[in-house]
Amino acid sequence: MMRSVIDRAGRLFLLLVCLFALPVAVMASDGCADASVHIDGWLIDHDKDLTPERLLELPESRWRGSLDELPTFSADAFWFRLRLDLDEQVPCQYRLSMGESRIEDQRLYQLVNGRWLESVAGSRHPVSEWADAHHNPGFPIVLEPTHSGLAFVRIETRSRIHVDPALTDYQQVVQERHISSFRDGVIFGLVLLLAPFGLVMSLIYRSWLVLFNVLWMLNYFLLTLVVNGYLFYFPDLLPWSRTLVATLSPAAQVTLFAYVYQLFELNRFSRIVRYGFWIQAAVGLMTLVYWGLGDSLTARDWFEFYRIATYFIYPTLLFIAYRNKIRLPVLAWCFSLFITLPGFRLLFEVQEEAPLFYGQDHLALDSNLLLSALLIITLVATAWKNRRNELALQQRVEKLQQATRQRLEKAVELRTRQLKAALQSRGNFLARITHDLRSPLTQTLDYARQLMLKEQSAAATNIIRSTQQQLFLLDDLMDYARGDIEQRELVSESGYLFSFLREIEEEGRLLAERQSNAFRLTTSQSLPVLVKMDFRKVHRVLRNLLDNAAKFTRDGEILCAVDGQPMGNNTIALIFRVCDSGPGIRPELRQQLTQPFNQGNTQDKGYGLGLAIVSELLGQMGSQLDIADSETDGSCFSFVLEVTATDESHIEQVFIDKRVKALDGNGYVIMLVDDTEATRLNLAELLGGYGFDTLPVANGSQALEKLTHTRVDLIITDQLMPDMSGWHLLDQVRKLYPALPVVLYSGLPPQAHSETPDLTFDASLVKPAASDTLLNTVLRLCQSGRRPA
């Protein structure tokens, strides 16, 4: 495959070498001798009925010699008498051309063997009838040696009349056509490359200037193709040559002035200047249309005058812009010089031609190079302008961003100062309110404790508990007032779960009794004794849920159920449910009840904050509140907390320190049975402080062994121990020492053994009990000296 590619590449290289060598070979070959053609005279055929025979009969006075008298435009036919001279010994073939290809009807008459032979060329004749098929019409002529021939040429055209006969041998014609084809190919390629590129760039830059420049270049390019005979390659379009010229000329004129309007930014000029510009553009456009369609020599003269007048438009616009201090782009000045200077040279030097189109201009295909260069310059100028505008816009945006940032920083600084001042004021206010609230609550707590010292009262206990809860809340408020705007973090600590639930039970019962409701607390066997969690937050959650249930339930029942589900790694999911038999909550109202200050559809007094506080607290603990219908047609609120099960080694105190009135335990020996050393030490310290003698043991076996040789007045035992449970120890003590009182002090409520259901402890306390309750119970049982009946 590689060899085939190399072979093809070699052939292509040889072909290119041959093609490039062909013009050189043609130039090197010998051609025909120089021949000359002379115009002996010319005349006007007004009636268009003359023939070669009649021309020979005309007197010599009818013929004119000077071409300077030849009109530029005319609707008549013209005859030219040509003299062809050749100084050569052999016959040679030549090509006769009469000048520009825009001459629409060209006819050559030669006398051969006594007969006039006619040859035709031009757009009025089909290409198949042309004597020499080429876009630049011409005629083949064979000249004999030392021959001076006579020929007549008849031309007729509605375009510009420009006659410049030339006689060229065909070898030179081939050479010129090679050069012309190469030049035309370069122009074609350049225009067809720039046009789509310019259209794309006009869309990218959104530039009307580039778009009109491209359209102007395309219209002018097509116009030069038609004028220079390139419709020869599209024979069916040749009869439409004049129509195409009449169409493309106004189109080029319109796009030119649209380009000028954008280039000079005439929208910045006064209205009078803009109206004047468009009026002169409309005049030129109408003149071109009338010229193309009406075939009026007067219109052609008008346009020639109009074309000369346009040379003064651009310097006039520059002068107006200068007077009005309108800054024009550099390209506008360059374009004005590009158009105006050659125009002035045309006015004052007749022999030179203006570089662009209309009137007496040649409309050469080469002039497209100027428009291509102008398009390139326009593209560069537009790109540079867009880049400059982009940089300026970027700098402006940066300045605006900087100013906005500075304003924002100042606003933030101001708002921050205002917020700090407001927070400081609020903090001071909350601190004062908290301080003022703590004083009466502390006094209330002292009075309740004094009442407890005089007589045991459940009401006093409830007062103390409620007051302590209020103090806890005030502590939270004080922390907030000190500047801790965020919610307090979780304070997880190890504690006795059942003691916590007993508190909840007592509070729930009090709340339920407000409206004659029954309260019930249920727990599962899978609950751990000790857990690590934020007891204060959980207490607030349950208190709000119970208060909410008690508020909306009358003469019904309120249930608080707690279940546990082991999850591994000492993690337990505690499932709390608070259900009531109240009116219930419609499903569409459940979502909004967790929002602050929303009470659903009830008329009860309140602020609607309870469930919102619950949802917020549960969110801090990684849980959420679920609302469902209760089995008793009420509402059921539930949530799940993942907690860690711990043991008593993490407990600092196994009792709640309460102030106790004068108590004397001298002479009494108390046996402490608990598998946790910290519990034994805490109880021994408490009892020893009031004169009791203590005998700590780690299990039931040691207790029974000590009892055989030591007098003991009372036993305090745990419920669950490794070798012997508290119930088993109670059973042995009842059998061996029936009068010895035994107190159960455990983190679990009493759970009787199935084999000994009749066994009961003399007293049962759940850890952590209040120190006054524990001491009074111990002293009472020691003084009784026997089991209660």
Image: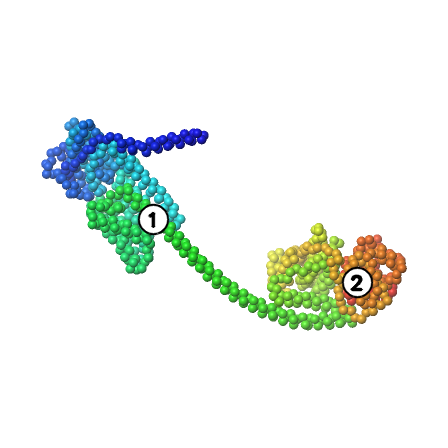
Element at label 1: helix
Kindly give the residue lying farthest to the front in the view shown.
28
Element at label 2: helix
The percent position of residue 743, horizontal first and vertical second, equals 82, 61
Quadrant where the C terminus lies?
bottom right
| Picture residue at 25% right of the left edge, 33% below the top | 172
Q: Which residue is mark 1?
A: 377
The percent position of residue 91, horizontal first and vertical second, equals 20, 28
The percent position of residue 747, horizontal first and vertical second, equals 77, 59
Q: Nearer the viewer, residue 258 or 697?
A: 697
Up the image or down, 21 lies above or below 306; here it is above
Quadrant where the N terminus lies?
top left
- Look at the image and name its color scheme: rainbow
Left or right side of 60 for 489: right
Residue 326 falls in image quadrant: bottom left
Left or right side of 675 for 572: left
Q: Nearer the viewer, residue 191 or 750?
A: 191
Up the image or down, 742 lies above or below 72; here it is below
Up the image or down, 487 lies above or below 233; here it is below
